[in-house]
């Protein structure tokens, strides 16, 4: 009897030890949130009343406040992905692959704008994966179609479109944006994304790496991606830049969040609680 009880106790401790080692291994495999780009100072960008609009402009970077992680949440919730690890190609082939899948009509009423999705060859990103994330950003809830006056539909290449959403390397983004009248350079390198006539141009470096103040504040990369799509599509729909409406409040989606938050908190949506959310025009 004593030998049986001893074996049972030993088995119980063995099970507990294995479970503890499994938890420790999972925590050790969490993705690092470090590796942010160095802060950028104020750098003037081309400005004007022309229709092409850069996603970023002259501003200082303001960190986003993040809530402290308690031991209980750290053990149960995986850390959010803040940026993709590894190098990001600075240049690609200058040619594009397109998502040839037709998409659903997003929105309940209003005019239909047709768009297609393209990814530069050599970017290392699958066009369908990028296209699915663009569709998620434009679906909402909280996207531009929540106005009830707009619908969006992805169409294959070869069909007539109102605009194309591109994911391109920084070098190509700089060239395409400049051809559309937009200078996206900050600190001497193509940094932001932009909108040129009929083109929503997303910079691969930002898509993969986010921006320093989002990373420092623990803002998930997925939220930045929602933001940059809705911001640039907002320009395509005719919306201009807006200001932070007050410290601690959500930033309007048309605020230049890639470069500054001015005390606001990161927000990827033009509609909050079913209502258009905005700040004063910049």
Image (cartoon, rainbow, N blue to C red):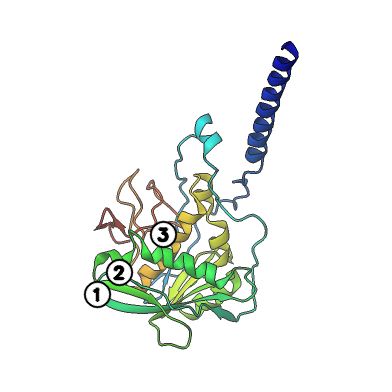
Rendered position, 8 above or below 75: above
- Secondary element under disc 1, as helix, strand or loop, is loop
Q: Considering only vertical position in the picture, is 249 above or below 181?
A: above
Q: CA distance from mark 3 to mark 1?
A: 27 Å
Pointers 3 and 1 in contact (C-beta within 8 Å) = no
Q: Nearer the viewer, residue 244 or 220?
A: 220
x and y percentages locating residue 230 in the rendered image: 39, 64
Badge nearest the viewer, 2 or 3: 2
Residue drawn at (37%, 48%) of the image = 264
Which labelled disc corresponds to residue 107? 2
Percent of width and height locating residue 40:
54, 54
> 10 Å neighbourhood of mark 3: few (<14), some, or many (≥20)?
many
- Mark 2 nearby-residue class (10 Å; few <14, some 14–19, many ≥20): many
Camera-side mark, 3 or 1: 1
Q: What residue lies at 63% left-to-right and 35% top-to-bottom?
A: 23
Q: Secondary structure at mark 2?
A: loop
Query: Residue tagged by mark 1?
Result: 110
Badge 3 is on which residue? 256
Tell which residue pokes out farthest to the right in this image. 3
Q: How many marks?
A: 3
Q: Is residue 5 visible?
A: yes
Per the model, the C-alpha gap separating discs 2 and 3 is: 25 Å
Distance from Cα at disc 1 to Cα at disc 2: 8 Å
Look at 69% across and 19% down and name the residue there: 9
Mark 2 vs 3, N-terminal side: 2
Judged left or right of residue 53, residue 271 is: left
Q: Quadrant of residue 196?
A: bottom left
Q: Earlier in the sequence, mark 3 or mark 1?
A: 1
Q: Is label 1 in contact with label 2 (beta carbons under 8 Å)?
A: yes
Q: Quadrant of the N terminus?
A: top right
Question: Few, some or many C-alpha atoms within 10 Å of disc 1 (few <14, some 14-19, many ≥20)?
Answer: few
> Image check: 157 left or right of 86?
left
């Amino acid at each position: 009897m004593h030998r049986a009880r001893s074996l049972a106790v030993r088995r119980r401790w063995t099970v507990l030890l294995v479970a503890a080692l499994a938890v420790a291994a999972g925590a050790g495999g969490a993705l690092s949130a470090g590796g942010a780009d160095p802060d950028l100072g104020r750098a003037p960008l081309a400005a004007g009343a022309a229709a092409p609009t850069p996603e970023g402009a002259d501003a200082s970077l303001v960190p986003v406040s993040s809530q402290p992680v308690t031991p209980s949440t750290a053990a149960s919730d995986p850390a959010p992905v803040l940026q993709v690890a590894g190098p990001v190609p600075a240049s690609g082939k200058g040619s594009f692959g397109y998502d040839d899948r037709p998409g659903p009509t997003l929105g309940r009423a209003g005019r239909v704008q047709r768009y297609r999705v393209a990814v530069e060859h050599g970017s290392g990103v699958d066009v369908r994966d990028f296209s699915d994330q663009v569709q998620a950003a434009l679906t909402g809830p909280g996207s531009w179609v929540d106005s009830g006056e707009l619908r969006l539909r992805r169409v294959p290449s070869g069909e007539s479109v109102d605009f194309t959403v591109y994911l391109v390397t920084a070098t190509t983004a700089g060239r395409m944006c400049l051809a559309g009248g937009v200078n996206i350079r900050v600190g001497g390198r193509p940094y932001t994304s932009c909108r040129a006539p009929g083109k929503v141009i997303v910079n691969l470096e930002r898509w993969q790496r986010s921006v320093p103040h989002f990373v420092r504040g623990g803002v998930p990369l997925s939220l930045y991606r929602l933001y940059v799509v809705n911001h640039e599509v907002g320009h395509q729909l005719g919306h201009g830049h807006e200001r932070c409406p007050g410290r601690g409040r959500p930033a309007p989606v048309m605020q230049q969040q890639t470069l500054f938050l001015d005390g606001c908190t990161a927000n990827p949506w033009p509609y909050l609680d079913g209502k258009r959310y905005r700040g004063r025009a910049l």
